[in-house]
Amino acid sequence: MAKRINLREFQQNLSKRMQEKSRMGSRLSMLGVQIAGQNYLVEMSDISEVLSMPVLTAVPLTKPWLRGVANVRGNLYCVADMAAYMQQGAASGAIINRILLVAERYAFNAALLVERVFGLRDTSNWQLDEKHADLYFDEHNVPWRKLDVVGLLGQTEFLQIGI
């Protein structure tokens, strides 16, 4: 005969498993990238895809940080060089450069050009700087800034690409 489990135990076990899964998901929800030689964290929920540098078509009369337009599976994306936008140089165009497609739920066909992608980062043991809410220090005391994609999409300067 099958072992009987009371409803309370079942609910508690289910709740515990869901909390553990949620905690694991949030621990690995940050993507480490490099922009202008500095380390940044990007929420995985803010991007839909990471791609190698595609062929770009130049767009005349735009700001210098707009590197061009990329065709990704029939959809056009404006590619913003994040280092140039932050006025900290420009991405090198090397083979390790990547573009991050902004999540579709934001309804912006934008891609962010970064120098390189380090992969997922477990930030659960990292220290948050008390003075700066967007600054973290990893286990080796290396600083990482959080890239606020939502805030970026709300900046007038980012939305006005024409000169």
Image (cartoon, grey):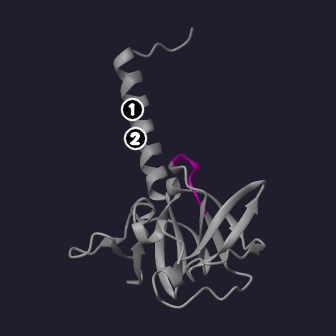
Q: Which range is magenta? A: 101-105
Q: Which residue is mark 1?
A: 15
Point out residue 129 in the picture as x, y percentages from the top left corner. 27, 75
Asked if labels 1 and 2 touch by Cβ distance under 8 angstroms, the answer is: yes
In the picture, measured across the screen, residue 151 lies left or right of residue 65, that is left
Point out residue 69 in the picture as x, y percentages from the top left corner. 69, 68
In the picture, measured across the screen, residue 13 lies left or right of residue 45, that is left
Please tell me which residue is depicted at 57% across the width and 83% down the height of the picture.
Answer: 64
* Image quadrant where residue 96 sits: bottom right
Whether 162 is drawn above or below 120: the answer is below
Q: Which mark is residue 19?
A: 2
Amino acid carrying mark 2 in the image: Gln
Measure the C-alpha gap from mark 2 to mark 1.
Answer: 6 Å
Whether 2 is drawn above or below 101: the answer is above
Amino acid carrying mark 1 in the image: Ser
Q: Residues within 10 Å of mark 1 (few under 14, many from 20)?
A: few
